[in-house]
């Protein structure tokens, strides 16, 4: 028996093991320009509960096709999964097998990557790495056991199809009782949308990288500074940015003049709504499915209890706002007590736009949408410098202990003292957290002599531990902001083996030429894969020599973020690396095969910030 997941799915899972997602081209309910928003978004449905494992696998049918659609007041071609953007909400169950038939109805190759899911590398969905891709008119069968639970998503890993609508949410229900109790459970998919051909967008960035930046610093901005030292420093700062071929307003490559921002496929005017009754606990599973956009998420009037990061349960932490990059996910629980509506506000990192929806006791209600806040600017800290150095003072280059800082000049460091470098020390080694003071994180290393070639415009002379810092632009907001040092894993499953070696990679780029890479080498220039040894425990250290945030994603294995919590460090599949930051993660190389490793800013990945990891 086949059922339609674009409608309410059956709650009795013994009645139907095979779930069919309607793919026939002649479905009467879908016309040329309507029904692009999936039913799971518009019906405000609550996720299903686990009813125990079954002997037969869950089977899904997905069709990838191009169609005309209307989104956010515009119209054009999209790449839809089962005729909708986002694609269908897939619900899997830990401990069961899934089978997904993906039919390619495009005239070019396509693929689906199951982001954050542990599986055989041949099923990971990256053309040229684990499989050849799905040719036009072909159907590919994905089949694998589900070994985890949590909030994830899926998307194309072919060309730039993700930007055109080829993505969707994925929730895996746990085998054991969920430690997170709630009365209602909603998925909230955030994305950036444009009908511009993404290949033309990339060509424009390559030709003129600041084409989409409408928040440039001008002479008028400098003249707005008070006369004297402040204006003098503003001029010096502007000249320093010019030498780096960047601007302090280079927060996002593409902003709200090009993008519309969607919540579950809806423009803010569409008002996605999640219903509740006062006193209920409401779980919201936030997925950043955007191609290029960081979001700042808050719900004015409600505090958030953050209960999971990248699908993995964490010890609950209370916050009022969080920033997350493309591909990251956070699960939160809110408990509204009044009969009022609340705005779910997802403001872009550069403050050029927003996605928004509503939590309300009744459909049709809406709360006030907060105004956009002042656009942020990058600082000397983001440049790998500090204000003292800019004022002509010598940087002391000492850490919290007063010791001279190490030079980070090698690719592999098997015996680095990471306690001294802020990895494994107490949390309060970081100057402040999201709940306290707001100064920059401590300097923990300085850059070595390698400047990474012509593909890199600059280096971070001073490398900082920024895991305890609020995200870009959130330093001075008058409420609690989630930071990476708040994250502690809930489960007691830490691999206590010490790492036997370290691999250090630098995130590099040249904004003016729009080149992005690791260690100054774009993907098409690399000699071979990064080698992991099967079964080893290793440390991966990432240094951001650029002045932009980069969400770095490793396929097939967890990145265990060394944020000072010992055996409770969190597992993540995607880690944001702030400008001039030095971040380390532990990896258990337990997944044989070839795996993609890349920046999850789509155009950065396409322009070279991509590598292959081989576990052998």
Image (tube, rainbow, N blue to C red):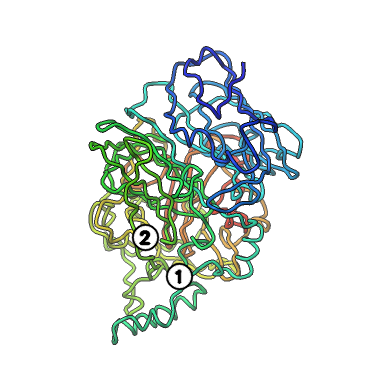
Of labels 2 and 1, earlier in sequence is 1
In the displayed structure image, the side of residue 227 where residue 512 appears, left or right: right
At horizontal 51% and vertical 37% (from top left) the residue drawn is: 169
Q: Position of residue 48 (x, y in %)?
A: 44, 24
Q: In the figure, 592 relative to 218: above or below?
A: above
Q: In the figure, 9 relative to 303: above or below?
A: above
- Residue 510 sits in quarter: bottom right
Mark 2 and mark 1 in contact? Answer it, CB < 8 Å.
no
Q: Position of residue 539 (x, y in %)?
A: 46, 46
Q: Which mark is residue 372?
A: 2
Q: Which mark is residue 303?
A: none
At horizontal 29% and vertical 55% (from top left) the residue drawn is: 430
**Residue placed most toward the observer, 170 or 355:** 355
- Residue 309 sits in quarter: top left
* Local secondary structure at mark 2: loop
Q: Position of residue 69 (x, y in %)?
A: 62, 46
In the displayed structure image, the side of residue 512 where residue 302 appears, left or right: left
Work out whether residue 356 can be spotted.
yes
Q: Considering the image in quadrants, where does the N terminus appear?
A: top right
In the displayed structure image, the side of residue 181 where residue 264 appears, left or right: right
Crowd tier of the residue under label 1, counting other residues whose Cα lies within 10 Å: few below 14, some 14–19, many 20 or above: some
Q: Give the residue pinned by disc 1.
A: 215
Marks 2/1: CA distance? 14 Å
- Residue 408 sits in quarter: bottom left
* Local secondary structure at mark 1: loop
Q: In the figure, 53 relative to 543: above or below?
A: above
């Amino acid at each position: 028996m086949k059922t339609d997941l674009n409608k309410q799915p059956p709650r009795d899972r013994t009645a139907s093991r095979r779930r069919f997602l309607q793919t026939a081209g002649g479905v009467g309910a879908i016309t040329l320009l309507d029904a692009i928003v999936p039913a799971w978004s518009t019906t405000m449905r609550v996720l299903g509960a686990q009813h125990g494992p079954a002997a037969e696998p869950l089977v899904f049918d997905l069709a990838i096709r191009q169609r005309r659609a209307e989104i956010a007041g515009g119209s054009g071609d999209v790449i839809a999964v089962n005729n909708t953007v986002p694609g269908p909400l897939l619900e899997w169950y830990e401990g069961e097998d899934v089978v997904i038939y993906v039919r390619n109805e495009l005239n070019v190759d396509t693929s689906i990557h199951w982001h954050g899911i542990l599986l055989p590398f041949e099923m990971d969905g990256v053309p040229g790495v684990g499989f050849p891709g799905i040719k036009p008119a072909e159907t590919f069968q994905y089949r694998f056991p589900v070994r985890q639970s949590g909030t994830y998503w899926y998307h194309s890993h072919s060309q730039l199809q993700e930007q055109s609508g080829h993505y969707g949410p994925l929730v895996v229900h746990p085998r054991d009782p969920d430690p997170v109790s709630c009365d209602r459970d909603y998925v909230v998919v955030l994305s950036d949308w444009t009908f511009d051909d993404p290949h033309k967008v990339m060509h424009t960035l390559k030709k003129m990288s600041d084409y989409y930046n409408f928040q440039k610093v001008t002479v008028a901005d400098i003249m707005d500074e008070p006369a004297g030292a402040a204006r003098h420093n503003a001029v010096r700062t502007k000249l320093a940015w010019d030498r780096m071929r960047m601007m302090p307003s280079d927060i996002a490559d593409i902003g709200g003049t090009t993008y519309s921002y969607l919540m579950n496929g809806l423009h803010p005017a569409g008002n996605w709504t999640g219903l509740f009754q006062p006193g209920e606990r409401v779980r919201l599973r936030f997925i950043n499915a955007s191609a290029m956009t960081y979001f700042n998420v808050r719900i004015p009037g409600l505090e958030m209890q953050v209960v999971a990061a990248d699908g993995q349960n964490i010890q609950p932490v209370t916050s009022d706002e969080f920033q997350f990059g493309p591909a990251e996910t956070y699960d939160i629980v809110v408990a509204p007590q009044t009969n009022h509506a609340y705005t779910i506000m997802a403001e872009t990192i550069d403050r050029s736009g927003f996605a928004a929806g509503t939590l309300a006791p009744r459909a049709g209600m809406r709360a006030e949408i907060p105004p956009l806040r002042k656009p942020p600017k990058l600082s000397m800290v983001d440049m790998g410098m500090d204000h003292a150095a800019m004022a002509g003072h010598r940087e002391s280059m000492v850490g919290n202990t007063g010791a001279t800082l190490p030079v980070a000049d090698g690719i592999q460091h098997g015996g680095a003292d990471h306690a001294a470098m802020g990895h494994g020390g107490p949390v309060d080694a970081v100057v402040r957290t999201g709940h306290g003071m707001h100064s920059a994180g401590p300097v923990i290393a300085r850059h070595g002599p390698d400047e990474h070639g012509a593909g890199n415009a600059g280096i971070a002379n001073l490398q900082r531990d920024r895991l305890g810092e609020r995200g870009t632009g959130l330093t001075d907001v008058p409420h609690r902001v989630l930071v990476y040092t708040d994250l502690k894993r809930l489960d007691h499953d830490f691999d206590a083996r010490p790492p036997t070696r370290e691999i250090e990679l630098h995130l590099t780029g040249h904004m003016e030429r729009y080149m992005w890479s690791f260690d100054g080498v774009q993907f098409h220039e690399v000699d071979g894969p990064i080698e992991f040894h099967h079964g080893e425990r290793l440390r991966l250290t990432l240094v951001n020599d650029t002045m932009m945030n980069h969400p770095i994603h490793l396929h097939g294995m967890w990145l265990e973020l060394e944020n000072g919590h010992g055996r409770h460090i969190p597992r993540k599949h995607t880690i944001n690396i702030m400008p001039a930051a030095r971040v380390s993660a532990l990896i258990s190389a337990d997944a044989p095969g070839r795996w993609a490793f890349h920046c999850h800013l789509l155009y950065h990945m396409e322009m070279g910030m991509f590598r292959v990891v081989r576990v052998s």
